[in-house]
Image: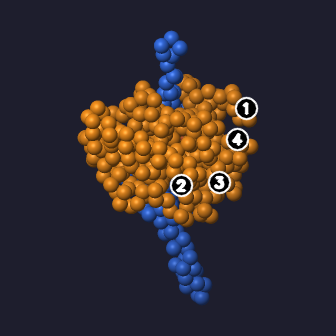
Chain colours: A orange, B blue
Amino acid sequence: MEDRSQTRRDFMKMMSMGAMAALSLGSLSCTRAQVEAFLQKHFREMTEAEKKEAIRRLEETYFRKYGKKFHISTQPADTAVLWGYGLDLSRCIGCRRCVYACVKENNQSRSNPQLQWIRVVRLKDGSLINLENTEHYYNPEKVPEPGFQYMPVQCQHCENPPCVRVCPVHATWKEPDGIVVVDYNWCIGCRYCMAACPYKGRVFNWGQPNIPPEELNTEVHYLGNRPRMKNVVEKCTFCIQRVRNGRYPACVEACPTGARKFGNLLDPDSEIRYIIENKRVFRLKEDLNTEPKFYYFFSA
Amino acid sequence: MKIVPLVLFAIIAFGVPVFAAHNNEYPVSTPPLTEGIFPCSNCHAGMDVNAKKRELKDEHANIKLHHAENDRWCLDCHNPADRDKLKLANGDKIPFTESYLLCGQCHGNIYRDWKVGIHGKRIGYFKGGQRVYFLCVNCHNPHDPKFKSLKPEPPPTKPERKNGR
Ligand code: SF4
Ligand code: SF4
């Protein structure tokens, strides 16, 4: 693994020297910040000082671009924590409040491209084992509809994530608290991870993201909801910027039926442990051995 | 003669602290009382108590009881002597912020799940700050508790066909 990333870095270094040379010839119009961002190290290899520098540069870039002061956190994982998510299928009514709360909290592009990290699928009653008969474009006057059930799907934060294994440049990895993250500055947009994910947990920014400036969330994490650029892959991070501060994810707070639960799998008193120990729990596509940390359950 | 101080001791040592603990144990959101309606004693203090089951016409006309209405009436939950409080089946007076005790009398399983955060919703901080529990009545109208259907947020836009492809 190390060898591969070394090769990649050497390759990038060579490329960037080329870019620098081109710059000095005046044939490329890059700003200094863009060049520095391009030369920046992998997030996990940065020293504290280098992280600070990268954050300063990013905050400057965002200020220039959006006219807003961002606060970008690099808060690391707490070692006593392994995050787990619970979703009560007997309560979800398919109202998509979670989807839009997520879009807002995490600075997703609103339209063209429209990116959403949560997809709520609708299934006929009794066809939970037949996931092929699902759809997510349903649009009735009111939910829930008689005869249907709903199942929100987002990144399952696999303990054994295939998306991480296939990334050729190690731009995505699993953090010690179990959150699967992407360093957008390192992502080359090859979309191997999207192909490898059995849950459609990732989406691709195929255009310049569109966010109304007044709706930007300026409280962000480097590995989470900071504004992304064109040509990178993004996904749910369990609201890393919130949960590492002890707050519930935005979707948990937005759900009007309280179907969404969150907690620390290592804490025997947490909500998520209670669910696993006392309710009927299942995980999606368990036969693939991806070991999701997203637990669907039935409370009633 | 000996019994009285013993009982008193028991109440002080066990009863009172247990009761007081409710508030801290479950920090709840504000009960969704109609604005300007509380304290109820503003109107009810001077009124005679009318325990007869009837249609409410002058005040509270919007309340239509759809909650085991054949067996129940206002004063099963609202304390007739002190309208600013609710009343448990055993006669205990409780504030509106502890209405979950009232609901829990009949809905034991759900009350058990609510206490551990499985039924209903919690918001705020689970560490390093205030965690807030939604009261049963923040989501369920106590007089008509069935969860109401909602208009869903719009579906995602379908991928466009472009350039004749
Ligand atoms: S907000 Fe809650 S009830 Fe609505 S779709 Fe999402 S999980 Fe289901
Ligand atoms: S759900 Fe998909 S994107 Fe999320 S960790 Fe698993 S494989 Fe990766």
Q: Chain of mark 2?
A: A
Distance of mark 3 from mark 4, alpha carbons? 19 Å
Provide the residue designation for mark 1. A130
Q: Are discs 3 and 2 located on one and the same chain?
A: yes
Precedes in sequence: disc 1 or disc 2: 1
Looking at the rendered structure, the kind of residue marked 4 is Lys
Distance of mark 3 from mark 2, alpha carbons? 24 Å
Provide the residue designation for mark 2. A175
Q: Of residues A170 and B61, which is closer to you in this image?
A: A170
Q: Are discs 4 and 1 located on one and the same chain?
A: yes
Q: Characterize the local packing of mark 4: few (<14), some (14-19) or many (20 or more) Cα atoms within 10 angstroms.
A: few
Looking at the rendered structure, the kind of residue marked 1 is Asn
User: Up-down: is A142 above or below A273?
Assistant: above
Could you tell me which secondary element the residue under label 2 belongs to?
A: loop
Distance of mark 1 from mark 2, alpha carbons? 32 Å
Looking at the rendered structure, the kind of residue marked 2 is Glu
Find out whether the residues at labels 1 and 3 contact each other: C-beta distance under 8 Å.
no
Precedes in sequence: disc 3 or disc 4: 3
Q: Chain of mark 4?
A: A
User: Up-down: is A137 above or below A187?
Assistant: above
Q: Residue at x 56, y 76 (%)?
A: B14
